[in-house]
Amino acid sequence: MNFEAISLQSGSNGNCIYVETESARLIFDAGLSCAETERRLSAKGRDIRKVDAVIISHDHADHIRYAGAMHRKYGIPLYITKDTLDVALMRHRLGCLTDVRHFRAGEAIQLGEVIVRTIPTPHDSADGAVFIVESGGRSLGIMTDLGHVFKELGDEISCLDAIFLESNYDPEMLMNGPYPAFLKRRVEGPGGHISNRESAELLLSGGRLRWACLAHLSQHNNYPALALKTHRKIVPQTLTLHIAGRNDSTQVFKV
C-alpha cells in the first residue's frame, strides 16, 4: 500500500509536511507560502489541488501563517482546534475561513481509511498537538514543538514505523549562542523545544522504526552534522536517519 511522506520545510522559518496514502493526501502545518508549497509538491510529482486536508498543530506563525491562504486558494478543509484558531485569529491575518473542522487535542481524526491520532503537548502554545498518521497497518509520527519530553512520548514512539522528530538545539551552542537570556530559557524550558540528545534518547524507544527524520533544527543553536553526530552516538546504526531541511524539501520517504 502506498504510504509516503515529504518534509517540504522544517524550522522556525516555516513548517510543512505532506503525507500521502492510497486514499488521502494531507498537509500538516502551513508555514510555507502557497506558491512555494505548490512548487515543491509539483517537483515531487504531487498536485496541491488534490490535497484533502490541512491539519494544524498549533498557533505559532511558522506553522499556521499561510493556513488561510491555502484554505481559500485551493479549497482545502482546515482541521484545527478551537483554542488554536481563536488565538491565531487574534495574532495572524488568516482571512475568511469557510470550511473549518475542529478537533480536540487527544482525539482522532478519521479521513477515509486514514486515522490521524492527535496528542496534546506542553509546548508554549494555546492548544498544541503532535500527530500519528495510521494507514494500512503502518504508522507515522509527526512530532515537533514538543515543549519537553513528556511521559507518553516513549510509548507512542515504540509503536511507530517512521517519524519526523524534533531535534532543535545543542545545549552548548544554545548556552554560548546569540540568543538573549530569556529566549535561551524559553528554548530549554518546559514549553520550548527538545535537544539533540533528548531526541536521540526518545528514538531508543522506537524498536519498529524504519527511519527517523530529524526536524525543526535551530538556525543558530544546531546544524545537521552535529544533530546526526549526537544521534549516532546513541541510536542503533541500523536506524536510518535523515534531516529535514530549513530551506528545502526532503526526498519522498516510504513509510
Image (spheres, rainbow, N blue to C red):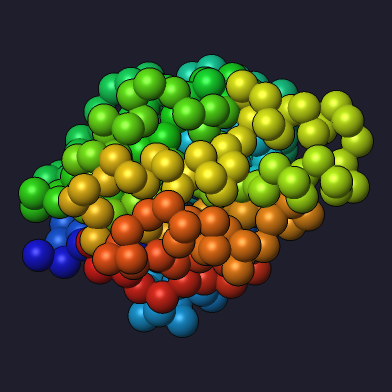
Q: Position of residue 84 (x, y in %)?
A: 55, 24
Q: Image quadrant of residue 209? A: bottom left
For residue 115, say whether it is visible: yes
Q: Image quadrant of residue 32? A: bottom right
Q: As rendered, which of 41 and 1 lies closer to the eye?
A: 1
Q: Is residue 199 left or right of residue 18?
A: right
For residue 125, say whether it is visible: no
How many dots with numbers?
Answer: 0
Q: Position of residue 172 (x, y in %)?
A: 74, 46
Residue at the image point whose x is 35% and y is 73% from the top: 252
Q: Position of residue 47 (x, y in %)?
A: 38, 71
Residue at the image point whose x is 9% and y is 65% from the top: 1
User: Is residue 84 depicted above or below 187 in this figure?
Assistant: above
Q: As rendered, which of 229 and 60 lies closer to the eye?
A: 229
Q: Position of residue 165 (x, y in %)?
A: 45, 48
Residue at the image point whose x is 23% and y is 39% from the top: 158
Residue at the image point whose x is 39% and y is 40% from the top: 202
For the view shown, which residue lies furthest in the front direction?
Answer: 233
Q: As rendered, which of 113 and 162 lies closer to the eye?
A: 162
Q: Is residue 220 left or right of residue 165?
A: right
User: Is residue 248 depicted above or below 219 in this figure?
Assistant: below
Q: Quadrant of the C terminus?
A: bottom left
Q: As rendered, which of 61 and 164 lies closer to the eye?
A: 164
